[in-house]
């Protein structure tokens, strides 16, 4: 079999089974294990597979930006669970920073009845949600990200570098043991990094569907995070794996 056809065959098996083993492929295709290793190395260079011990798995696509209208209705109950868990971390008199996103929007909805808090955000949807509350609300300013509602850019960075907050609730597009916390764009990652720097403590808030995913640009490693607040639907094997790197609330 021609190498190109052989690699195409391997990809079809991967799309069905999710994983292939070198020895099994060697026997099935009647070629040496070294030939299969070279095939898998080539596929990995092309970004189509990820090499693992004894074989390979299908590479997952990078997570891309999702418009607000598309993500608002996803994992709603899980996001509400997360928001309720954050309340124990928010004390009267504190200044808190809410990242853009639908999970942090759920936090804002629970804070609407509070009084003695200052909320800073780079999300116009969150600011609008708190419009009629008794909270002191500050918006970072900056350029508006179309269809998402997030603010970013130099103006927002300048504002954030001159403030100090008690707690930052960090949203995430993707979370992976090796890659850490990642986002779809360099600009968004930089914004989150500046927010982390302004906070005494940072808590990651994300539903469990974000685990074992990667996006384009790294935000930070788990060493920059005080803890992780997620929903109760997280599989036990995922919680056990990530518990080695980050504390769960």
Image (cartoon, grey):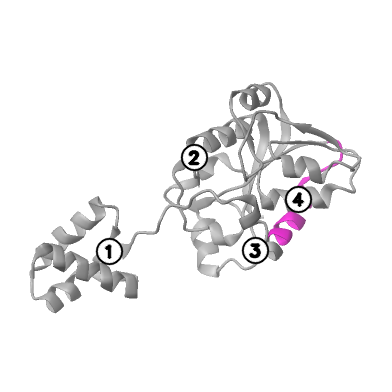
Q: Residue at coordinates 68% horizontally, 23% vertically from top-left?
A: 159
Camera-side residue: 129 or 229? Answer: 129
Camera-side mark, 1 or 3: 3
- Residue position marked by numbered label 1 in the rendering: 56
Q: Residue at coordinates 19% horizontally, 76% vertically from top-left?
A: 24
Camera-side residue: 211 or 237? Answer: 211
Q: Position of residue 217 (x, y in %)?
A: 46, 41
Do the residues under discs 4 and 1 have CB atoms within 8 angstroms? no
- Residue position marked by numbered label 2 in the rendering: 185
Do the residues under discs 3 and 2 have CB atoms within 8 angstroms? no
The mark that comes first in sequence, 2 or 4, is 4
Q: Position of residue 123 (x, y in %)?
A: 70, 40
Q: Which mark is residue 107?
A: 4
The answer to which quarter of the image holds residue 235 is bottom right
Per the image, label 1 sits on a secondary structure element best described as: strand
Distance CA(mark 1)–CA(mark 3): 31 Å
Q: Quadrant of the C terminus?
A: bottom right
Asked if residue 85 lies in the magenta stretch, the reply is yes
Distance CA(mark 2)–CA(mark 1): 28 Å
| Left or right relative to 25: residue 96 | right
The mark that comes first in sequence, 2 or 1, is 1
Q: Which mark is residue 75?
A: 3
Q: Is residue 245 visible?
A: no
């Amino acid at each position: 079999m021609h190498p190109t056809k052989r690699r195409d065959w391997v990809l079809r098996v991967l799309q069905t089974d999710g994983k292939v083993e070198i020895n099994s492929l060697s026997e099935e295709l009647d070629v040496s294990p070294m030939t299969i290793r070279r095939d898998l190395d080539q596929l990995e260079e092309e970004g189509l597979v990820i090499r693992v011990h004894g074989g390979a798995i299908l590479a997952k696509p990078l997570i891309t930006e999702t418009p607000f209208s598309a993500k608002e209705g996803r994992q709603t109950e899980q996001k509400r669970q997360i928001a309720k868990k954050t309340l124990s971390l928010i004390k009267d008199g504190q200044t808190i920073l809410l990242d853009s996103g639908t999970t942090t929007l759920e936090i804002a909805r629970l804070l609407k009845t509070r009084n003695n808090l200052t909320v800073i955000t780079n999300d116009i949807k969150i600011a609008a949600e708190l419009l009629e509350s008794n909270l002191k609300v500050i918006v970072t300013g900056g350029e508006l990200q179309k269809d998402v509602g997030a603010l970013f850019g130099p103006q927002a960075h300048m504002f954030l570098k001159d403030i100090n907050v008690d707690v930052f609730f960090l949203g995430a597009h993707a979370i992976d043991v090796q890659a850490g916390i990642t986002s779809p764009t360099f600009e968004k990652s930089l914004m989150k990094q500046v927010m982390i720097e302004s906070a005494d403590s940072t808590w990651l808030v994300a539903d469990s569907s974000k685990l074992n995913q990667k996006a384009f640009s790294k935000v930070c490693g788990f060493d920059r995070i005080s803890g992780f607040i997620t929903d109760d639907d997280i599989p036990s094997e995922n919680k056990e794996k990530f518990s080695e790197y980050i504390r769960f609330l």
